[in-house]
Amino acid sequence: MKLRLKLSACIIAVAILPIIILYIISSSSFVSSMSDFQVSSMKNINADKSAFINEMLLNHTMNIKSFASDETIRNFAENGEMADAEYATDLINQTVKKYDDITDMYIIDNDGIVIAAFDRDDVGTTDQNADYFKEIATKNNGISRFFTPKAAGEGYFFIVRRIYSHSNKQIAIVCEEITLSKIDRVLNLAGFSNYASILLIDSDGKYITSSFANPKTLESVSEYKEIGKQLQDAIPYYSEAVSAETLMSSYGNYTVCGTAIETGGWSLVCSYNKRTASSAINNNYLGMRTAVILLVIAAAGLSVFISVQYTHPIRKIIRVISNLNHGETNVRLDLNSNDEFGEISTAFNNMFDNMFESEQRYKTVVSMMDNVIFEINLKTYKIYVSNNFNQKFSFRAKDDSVSESFLYKMKVHKDDAKRYNDDLTAIVSSGGEKWEGEYRLKNIYGDFSWIRIRGRKFYDRNKTPTKIIGMLVDIDREKKSAITLMQKANYDALTQLYNRATFTRTLDEEIKQSTARRSLDALMFIDLDDFKHFNDEFGHKCGDEVLKFVADTIKELTFDKGFGGRLGGDEFVMCLTRLKVIDDAGNVAADMIKILNEGFDSESTGNHFVVHCSIGIAFFKESGENSRDLIEAADTAMYKIKKSGKSNYTYAGGYTDKSTDLFDLPPI
């Protein structure tokens, strides 16, 4: 008899029993318990959504509080300086662009006049809501009521914050207009839409059901009039002491829960119609019960069929497969039957033969390769590594687990360790598909050598990752050759600073970025005073030590704010980026002169030498739009110092007053 006939007979024999049991245990109590469960779920949903809105409001209030406390904003509101006005406008633009739900932002003085705004056309106009904003700034954390949506748009509200002078007097208010777009997902009760509604109520007692709805009073809608006082009992803002606790109230066929949104004095209210819900649940239950009956019938029939008819052959298949997994390559599956199991036996034996041949082919190819091959089994977390690994690396694993393998235990160069660990985690523990990276690993001689690791993830038919196969390729010689060539091409051989070509190319790129970000940046031209004295009196080796000492000083001073280079001989250059005031460049120049004046101990002569230099400073845009003009301007300024006594610095373009405050950037 064929397998499908045996299975059909078993299912028919036991079909009636699950149906009888299912109807006995079914009762109307299920509907009631489901209704109670949904009421409880609605309360939790209401509390979670309220917490989300409260968090959103809190983030906005903290943001506007930080804005109103900004020292430059306070100076601008009090004194109205043009430089501060530009800063205020930029900070407003940054704030609006940072949050996708802020649609407008502006500052109003005590007379209701807009003095700074996201829309510059609003500056100088009178805000019609100024009196309301002054009032709302004193309560509800400055959070307003809901405003009616503009044409074809969404509703919105305002967050207002007072700006105080340095004498602690209110001198202005800052207003953020925030769209209710993020509220829509809160006002969606997934799974309750047929028999529940949700309202967001502001501090004036008006509600909305979506971000596009007009705010309405509860008394103006007949549905909520029917619920009556029970709805007000569930609205926390009616209480004298507002808290975050969710209030519940029941009336007739309705259950209502409400949660206070403390930050804005708002409330979130869910209204649940128990009669409609019970009817819907009962209708759904009938369909579910039919599906469960069919599922139980199928499951019972399949269970009996497997346990009575086919336990023995299946166990035999499992045993043979287990032996194969443990390395017994000569196993055979012998099922002498005329049904599908006989066909399975033949198919399995053919598959075993093909697997054995494939494994032998794979091992032969691996043994002939110079590269190290590894394979990670993602089901057992065991690893296989080709034998030639021991010829290249001294690391020996305790066992064949992945956690004890060279992947996690072998020494990686400290400069490559983080990148190596991130790449390893990406393919082993995360969803990475491949591994491509070059790292320095400790070899069998105890040195670090460059190794390229390539790995690919493999999947079964269910798209589940099963293994990772990878390769370790020794690229030490070619990598070190490439690094040496790069250093020779881009760096000065003696000082390891940028050479002239690399510095000018990098400077031109920095000039473009400076224009885009509107920052204050400068170039310093440094020439050593009387450098020839070191070479003539103490030899060129001593002169090289002087140049290295100067280069190390430049690297230290530009570590986090620029880069340096050597143009040739005793001429050096430094690029300083993102300066705040002109005097920052002068301070760096003064530090340079001071450090060189402190001197260094010469290894070749045993003497302590003091080094002097002259420095010219040129600012981007002011002194030139390209590297050639900037270097020429700084060089010219440096020669002024050479002629006037040396060992000092000066600015190109007449900037000699070091007390100058802010650098007035020319318009772009």
Image (cartoon, grey):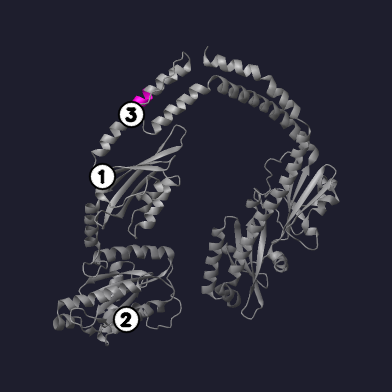
Distance from disc 3 to disc 1, alpha carbons, whole Å, reads: 23 Å
The residue positioned 45% from the left and 47% from the top of the image is 429
The first of marks 2 and 3 along the sequence is: 3
The quarter of the picture where residue 613 lies is bottom left
Instruction: Please tell me how many numbered marks the rendered image carries.
Output: 3
Relative image position of residue 253 (x, y in whole percent)? 83, 41
Task: Write down the residue under mark 3.
Answer: 356
> How far apart are labels 2 and 3 at the CA level?
73 Å
Judging by the rendered image, the residue that carries numbered circle 1 is 388
Our reading of the magenta stretch's main secondary structure is helix
Q: Position of residue 315 (x, y in %)?
A: 49, 26
| Residue to which mark 2 is pinned | 595
Labels 1 & 2 near each other (Cβ < 8 A):
no
> Mark 2 or mark 3: which is in front?
3
Q: Which residues are magenta?
A: 350-355
Amino acid carrying mark 2 in the image = Ile
Task: Please tell me how crowded label 2 is: few (under 14), some (14-19), or many (20+) other residues with Cα within 10 Å.
Answer: some
Which residue sits furthest top?
Answer: 1
Q: Are marks 2 and 3 in contact (CB under 8 Å)?
A: no
Work out whether mark 3 precedes mark 1 in sequence or the reverse, and give the earlier one: 3
Q: Splitting the image into 4 quarters, where does residue 539 fall?
A: bottom left
Q: Which residue appears at 18% of the width and 81% of the height?
A: 605
Q: Is residue 36 left or right of residue 394?
A: right
Q: Amino acid at mark 3?
A: Phe
As drawn, 285 above or below 645 = above
